[in-house]
Image: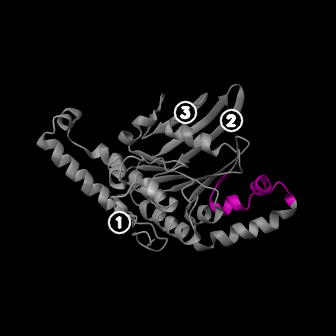
Amino acid sequence: MGPLAQPTGSQKTHDTAPTARLEMTGINVAFGGVLALTDVSLTVEPGQVHGLIGPNGAGKTTLFNVACGLVRPTSGRIVWRDRELARLRPDKLTSMGIARTLQGVGLFPGMTVLENVMVGAHRHAKAGFLSALLALPTSDKDERLLRERAMRALTELGAEAYAGRYPGSLPYPVQKRVALARALVSEPELLLLDEPASGLSEDEMTELGELILSVTGRMSVLLVEHHMDLVMRVCDRITVLDSGKQIAAGTPAEVQANPAVTEAYLGDAVDVEADAAELTHADGGRTHG
């Protein structure tokens, strides 16, 4: 596979600076009387990459699903574009300027790669359902524009050669690219990424980091990830969960210096120095303000 087609280097571009902010405050989630999240808060600032990390079972996916509308919190507030969302629904995310990828690629097996990405671009369609049903000229023009938009997204990720293929015939890393293209094609203001680096090689993970940094000039990113080298390289802020509770929040440097974070990951304070050294090495490629 060729490299992702985006600018190299770790500098962010700000052609159209994002302005929307996601605020999650005092989030509590209970499943059958068992608390999965307890009083968790985070804010994804405009144009920033906010990492969400923690050991297995920490509650990262649950909080991510709250942000997606897949899980309704027992209590707490979600504010997007300065408006509280009382009943966030996953089917409304795209129209709100939010796109997401999940741990699994979630592609439609009976549709080609291009058609899968076109689904993500549908918010830009001008023709309504009736026009499409009656095959009116407006619908034909809409489909042509959506195809062009989808091809540009695939080209940005170096996956245009697979446009006519079906997802099941592609290697998993390519499927991940297609899923990311489907999210980016909607031109969101907020991109929610759930473990995008899983199944990727080291080189592919480096390319993914460069892509994430390149898009923050036009959107914010909430990143759930367990690859610490990627998290430390691309994130402006990090929130750390453990057993459903928030144990730390701050810049990568602040988080990596927090003994509670090291202990949560290692379960043994004896290895604090070794873990801190690993995180320091991972953070070497980026300066945080």
Magenta segment: does it hold 259? Answer: yes
Residue type marked 1: Ala
Badge nearest the viewer, 2 or 1: 1
> Is 248 situated above or below 34?
below
Quadrant of the frame with the N terminus: bottom left
The amino acid marked with disc number 2 is Ala
Q: Residue furthest left?
A: 137
- The residue mark sitting in front, 1 or 3, is 1
Question: Which kind of residue does numbered mark 3 sit on?
Answer: Arg
Q: Main secondary structure of the magenta part?
A: helix
Within 10 angstroms of label 3, few (less than 14), some, or many (20 or more) residues?
some
Residue at x 58% of width, y 58% of height: 198
Query: Residue, x 25% and y 44% (percent of image)?
Result: 125
| Disc number for residue 220 | none
The residue segment tinted magenta is: 249-269
Residue under pointer 1: 161
The CA distance from mark 3 to mark 2 is 16 Å
First of labels 2, 1 by sequence position: 2
Disc on res. 77: 3
**Between 151 and 236, which is closer to the camera in this rendering?**
151
> How many numbered circles are shown?
3
* Mark positioned earlier in the residue sequence (1 or 3): 3
Q: Secondary structure at mark 2?
A: strand
Residue wearing tag 2: 36
Apparent side of residue 177 relative to residue 289 in the rendered image (left or right): left
Q: Residue at x 55, y 40 (%)?
A: 65
Q: Is residue 281 left or right of residue 221?
A: right
Q: Give the quarter of the image for residue 66.
A: top right
Q: Please, which residue is most extreme toward the right here?
A: 270
Q: CA distance from mark 2 to mark 1?
A: 43 Å
N-terminal-most mark, 3 or 2 = 2
At which x and y percent is residue 14? 38, 63
